[in-house]
Image: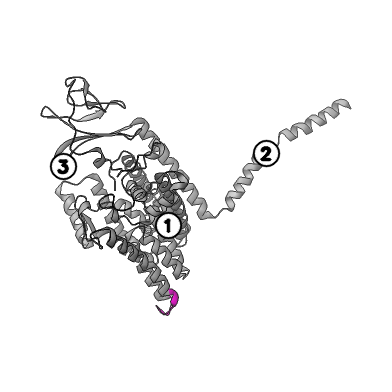
Amino acid sequence: MWISGQKSWLSSHFKIQKTPPMPKLKTTLLQSWQKVNEAWRYAIVAFILLRLLYTLWSWAIFTFQPLAVQNFEFAGEPILSIFNLKDSQAYTYLREVNGEILTFTPAGTEHLTDRETGSVWDISTGMAIQGKYKGTVLRPSKTPPSRLFPYHGVAPYPGIWLSVWQRFDANWYISIAENGYGQIPGDIHFPPLFPLLIRTLQPVFGSSFLAGLFLSHLAALFALKFLYELFLGWGEPNTGRRAFLFFVVYPAVFFLFSAYSEPLFLAAALLAFKAMHKRSWHWAGFWIFCAFLIRLQGVALLAPMLFLMRQDRPFLRRLSHWAGLLVAASGGLLYLYLRSISAKDTLPLVETDLHARLVFPWQSYAYAVHALFSGSAAFIDFLNWAITTLFLILLVAGWKKIPLEYNLFTAVSLAILLSRMVETQPLVSMSRYALTLFPSFYILSVTGKGPLSRRVIIYLSILLNLYLSGQFFLWGWVA
């Protein structure tokens, strides 16, 4: 009796111990996750995977290649530029020593070696400490480090895990947020809403750069959610999900995670379209107003707005039509007013400081083709041309495959983007600007649905993504 009682107690005791709470918790979490809206699930997973990928990739770069060393010609000088990713210290020297042009490579984190003689050079002083040129000091370049690594008066962020994202346009926006317009020649070319939001959130984060990163990350997450909803609403689910995947692996998608304006513009444009389709014209006008003040490309949203208004009869005889148009147009008028009081030219027909001017779109494209055949083009010039050509082809090929209002947005956007010609780099930044041409990714999904073409698009995109993001972290111009 006692033994059987003990067995009963032990068995009941161990039964209790054999029922851990974890499986039940796991089931509860899984059920909760399944209840989340599908678009949010895909957006959150894509966002986390991308952020994890870039975190690991940046770690690999600043661990195994902490020095960004470049040997090149600039302004008639043979220049050596050095940037230390770990402390953001930068140096520029002349590569010419006793009439010989040297080529330098990293040797640890504090020294360089030249390929010609094998001499070892100290980075901070420019002095050779071993080898043929021992005791020789490299002359400073006339081009200061601030010209090649432009922070525009903004302090580099001290944490290396995030500082690799503080590059190029991010510093323009941060500088405007901290100092206002007029501190840097050409800063008025950057519309004010993104810097204003950064300035508003700066006290919360204690850093303008962190505020900019937060805004970009938040906007990117919402944009991914809106994109997934949009793509799935255009046709069969597999095509929509494939379009979403093509966008997520796009070579320049990493710009969504820096303090750039693309994610904010993308979110505003998608919200404007959602409001247009609900015939909520005042909200559509508000989001276009925001888009205007984020990027001048916002004017492209007026074309689909007028097209959809025409279907909402009677056209321009509703108060809501005029209210929406007035709110939308006021964004452009406000930006022109800010230019009129801050810049010499209200309309940016010529941007002397940026070597840019307005031309007809075909002139910009022809200039790029001429530059490619001249033999002076760099890899990024070929990539910008290839992406521009691809998106032009997709626009024509998919004209009837998606709702017309989205094609109008893409067509006007391309016309606007191609109308600005930068003489020093044809089709500058088109690989990045193409992020905002979101309808083209669906057309790419329709035309690239075969197994082979799908693999080519995905694998090539991932390889280019890793290459371009790595160059971006190392201060390489990739857009």
Q: Residue at x 27, y 62 (%)?
A: 340
The residue tagged with tag 1: helix, strand or loop?
A: helix
Is label 1 or label 3 in front? 3
CA gap, disc 1 to disc 2? 41 Å
Image coordinates of residue 475 in percent, x first then y, are: 30, 40
The residue carrying mark 3 is 75
Q: Residue at x 39, y 58 (%)?
A: 442
- Residue type for callout 3: Ala
Is label 2 or label 3 in front? 3
CA gap, disc 1 to disc 3? 40 Å
Whether residue 447 is visible to the viewer of this picture, yes or no, is no
The main secondary structure of the magenta stretch is: loop
Is label 1 or label 2 in front? 1
166 magenta-colored: no
The residue carrying mark 1 is 267
- Residue type for callout 1: Ala
Q: Quadrant of residue 360?
A: bottom left
Q: Residues within 10 Å of mark 3 (few under 14, many from 20)?
A: few
Tag 2 and tag 3, C-beta contact below 8 Å: no
The residue carrying mark 2 is 21
Whether residue 17 is visible to the viewer of this picture, yes or no, is yes
Image coordinates of residue 98 in percent, x first then y, are: 11, 27
The residue tagged with tag 2: helix, strand or loop?
A: helix
Q: Image check: 7 left or right of 148?
A: right
- Residue type for callout 2: Pro
